[in-house]
Amino acid sequence: MWRSVLECCFLLSLTTSALAAEPNPTGLWQRGDGNARVKISRCGADFCATNVWVKDPSSGEAVGDVLKMMVKPTSATMLTGQAFDRKRDLTYSMELSVQPTNMSSRGCIVGGLLCKSVSWTRIR
């Protein structure tokens, strides 16, 4: 019986350690091209990236646009899953690689045939 309890506690400690090391994309980010800034925050169990500043809205981007990211950690720096763009009515496969001061995102549609990668810098 004690062995079962010890195994349970060991597995629980591993799970807790993995959760503590979960990548955290929340905060303010500037896109690598300097044309947009987003605030990423929790929205329920998911993350929402909301445009808070757009330099040139002629491409269809606007302040207030939201990308809902339904992603889960796959490593200490990677989140993967899907993202939904309500404005364009598109669902993307999504990967986020999160570091303390930078992040890269990769979104794909059409079964991975059309993909776009973007670099981000954290704004303090």
Image (spheres, rainbow, N blue to C red):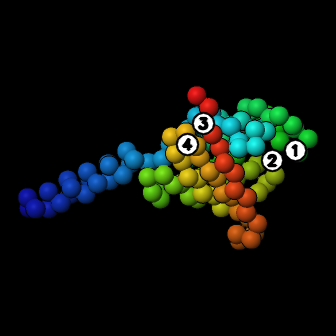
Q: x and y percent of residue 91 in the render?
A: 72, 58
SS of the residue under disc 3: strand
Q: Which residue is mark 4?
A: 25
Residue 28, numbered circle: none
User: Which labelled disc corresponds to residue 87?
Assistant: 2
Label 4, label 1: how far apart the Cα atoms are = 24 Å
The residue carrying mark 3 is: 122
- Tag 2 secondary structure: loop
Residue at the (55%, 39%) spot, across then down: 101
Asked if labels 1 and 4 touch by Cβ distance under 8 angstroms, the answer is no
Q: Mark 3 belongs to which amino acid?
A: Arg
Query: In what quadrant of the picture does the C terminus appear?
Result: top right
Image location (x, y in percent) of residue 115 = 73, 63
Q: Amino acid at mark 2?
A: Lys
Please give left or right for residue 79 compared with residue 65 in the image. Answer: left
Q: CA distance from mark 4 to mark 2?
A: 22 Å
